Image (spheres, grey):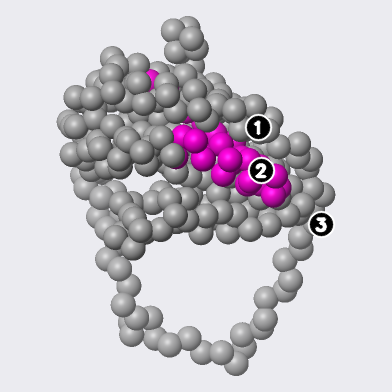
Amino acid sequence: MGSKRKKMNKELYEKTLESLQLELIKMQDWIKAKGLRVVVIFEGRDAAGKGGAIKRITEKLNPRVCRVIALGVPTEREKSQWYFQRYVAHLPAAGEMVLFDRSWYNRAGVETVMNFCTKDEADYFLKTCPEFEKMLIDDGIILIKYWFSVSDEEQEKRFQGRINDPTKRWKISPMDLESRTRWVAYSKAKDKMFKHTDTKHSPWYVVDADNKKKARINCIAHLLTKIDYKEIEKPSIELPDRQPDDAYERPPMEEQNFVPNYAEKVIKAEDA
């Protein structure tokens, strides 16, 4: 596995990431120009690095073209709907790419393991999910599914890091802690999910995520191969002359409420 090999140093990682992000911009422009509809699903264990990968994919892209969907707990009304219904509402229109940070596969994972759905509901999902995804693909949607795989040891390390880091502690929910006690149950649920939904028309792509940097690079590089894009020629841009403001009088600066210059205060403290 990639994580067992030599680590990627920060300089090489950032250089490679920047290159890939430039390609993502080209792909985004192609999606918009050609009216493509793209759905990318990110699944995996807690702390597997899905969020970090999504962040690196989206941080240079236009949020009007590429958006992230991370749904919370369904409402009582949503619980009474067709299971896929609340996800369908977020599918892309022409010229859009949607990244699902967890998706309808919640039913095959957390809902199954935590008994939030019945066995019949879970089995019915596994039976109908391939049919649902085939409908999407037959309608022209490009569907790409990633499973971020992380070892027990690495997940433990990341959880400990989150507990001790106040900037990351919010990432740990009671559900995350409970999932640690059901590691084997989650493994069995994932295996069963793959057996039913890793299909020829909609395969799963597994990302070895024990090394975060390499996982992000590998995922983005693979994503770029799944859409046959070309660079869109763009017209040159020339800034027009600014409108003359000879007759315009600005209101007095002292009448405006400026935020305090905290940055200057920090600089002076550092120089002291």
Residue 33 percent across, percent down from the top left = 76, 54
Residue in the picture at 27% in, 66% down: 260
* Residue behind mark 3: 235
Residue 11 at least partly seen: no
Q: Secondary structure at mark 1?
A: loop
- Count residues near mark 1 (Cα–Cα under 10 Å), then give few for <14, some for 14-19, many for 20+: few
Boundaries of the magenta span: 125-150
* Residue behind mark 1: 201
The amino acid on which the numbered mark 1 sits, given as a three-letter code, is: His
Residue in the picture at 28% in, 23% down: 185
- Count residues near mark 2 (Cα–Cα under 10 Å), then give few for <14, some for 14-19, many for 20+: some
Q: Is residue 88 above or below residue 24?
A: below
In this rendering, which labeled residue sits more in front, label 2 or label 3? 2
- First-in-chain label (2 vs 3): 2
Query: Residue 57: which disc?
Result: none
Residue 60 percent across, percent down from the top left = 56, 46
The amino acid on which the numbered mark 2 sits, given as a three-letter code, is: Ile
Residue 154 percent across, percent down from the top left = 31, 18
Q: CA distance from mark 1 to mark 3?
A: 38 Å
The amino acid on which the numbered mark 3 sits, given as a three-letter code, is: Pro
Please identify the quarter of the rendering in which residue 151 is found. top left
Q: Is residue 29 left or right of residue 204?
A: right
Please identify the quarter of the rendering in which residue 257 is found. bottom left
- First-in-chain label (1 vs 3): 1
